[in-house]
Amino acid sequence: MGKPVGTEGPGAVGTPLNIGIVGCGKIVGQYLESFRRLPDVRLVAVADIDASRAQDVAREYGDGVRALGVDELLAAGDVDLVLNLTVPAAHAEVALAAIAAGKHVYGEKPLAATTREAREVLEAAREAGVVVGCAPDTVLGTGIQTARKAIDDGLIGEPVAATATMVTPGHERWHPNPDFYYVPGGGPLLDMGPYYVSALVTLLGPVASVIGAASHTRAERVIGSGQRAGERIPVTTDTHVTGVLVHESGALSTLVMSFDAVKTKSPNIEVHGSLGTLAVPDPNHFDGDTQLFRLGGDDWETLDTTAGYLDSGRGYGIADLARTLAGGAVEEPRAGGTLAYHALDVMESLLESARTGRAVQVTSRAERPRAVVLEDLADRAREGSLSA
């Protein structure tokens, strides 16, 4: 079992959290870039079912990082937290193994393939006394956080509604192995929905119920790149999902997630209030301009950047988790397992509503994550400080 929070063990003040990565696919490069500039985390080991990929990553990163087998990494005494970058179907299995080894866990989205598996992960972590975090941590960047501060400061008055739209003609056009996007557990909602649902909860609070509808227009897709270019793959899940999220606050969010449409001209997220409307940056990115149109105004105005981690990238959620541990307080990290579970519950409920044609109550609840003040985490490295 991991050492208690706030001791001289992992996460103690002044001690970087040692990271071991399981899964060295395409996304790993973005985490490596962040780790190089974050003082609160230190990469020590990597593993992959393809040993050569782990060796390549260890060689590229340098700094003493070891390429290990998965079991070796889980057993390594110097690994405090396992970063789980496996495919969604393996998220729960790897997370449970890491927790059983006494490690904190941070995973790519979604937390697990199903809420049943996700509950097992959270329950196991609670019993083991370790912490679970989960992407997306894009909500910690200056884009979403500046929009959140604008809402909290009353710039749009009482929030009434939001729209969240993501449309693309399909990942098979660029991904060399897109099969998992088009089977149950995939689709646009479970792939891209975590960014949008997490952002909407950050902006407007938890979701109480949903009404959904879904469809798919093609029975197969054609791979457009890589060694399998031209190969046809079957589609066995819905590829266009839409619905309404009823927030506990009473605000209504309309969600559109599609692998069937081509493009949208609208902002990815708009939030409407009694005194104005916010155009919110893409929740798949960490920054971007937040624009405000005030009641009685003549045009959109771009708001100053006022909140969030500056120049952030994938992995900042782990640094935020490390700071939570270092502070000694037993509290949920901002990109935490509870929020990730709630987002997954919202998405599963939408699909259930689409299947049954009825509104579905969302049984889970997640507190709106704590706001992020404007800060440059990497700048702390230049100052030589590891204090929270």
Image (cartoon, rainbow, N blue to C red):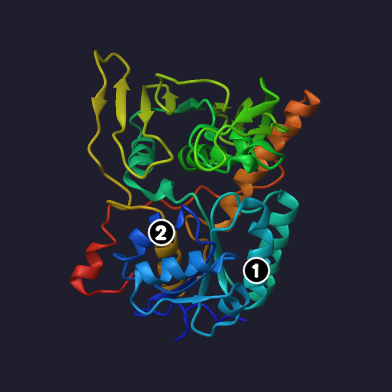
Position of residue 360 measured from the top left corner of the image (x, y, whole percent): 74, 32
Mark 2, residue position? 31
CA distance for labels 1 and 2:
23 Å
The quarter holding residue 100 reads: bottom right
Q: Residue at x 68, y 55 (%)?
A: 118
Foreground: 253 or 186? 186
**As displayed, is residue 287 above or below residue 33?**
above
**Number of numbered discs:** 2
The quarter of the picture where residue 184 lies is top right
Which residue is farthest right?
Answer: 356
Residue beneath disc 1: 125
* Element type at mark 2: helix
On screen, residue 339 versus residue 323, left or right, reads right
Question: Is 271 rendered above or below residue 369?
Answer: above
Element at badge 1? helix
Please report the residue visible at 24 percent of the width from the left and 13 percent of the height from the top. Answer: 298
Front-most of residues 276 and 354: 354
Marks 1,2: beta carbons within 8 A: no
> What is the x, y in percent for residue 209?
68, 33
Badge 2: few (under 14), some or many (20 or more) residues near its Cα, within 10 Å? some
| Amino acid type, label 1 | Ala
Residue type at mark 2: give it.
Tyr
Q: Position of residue 316 (x, y in %)?
A: 39, 58
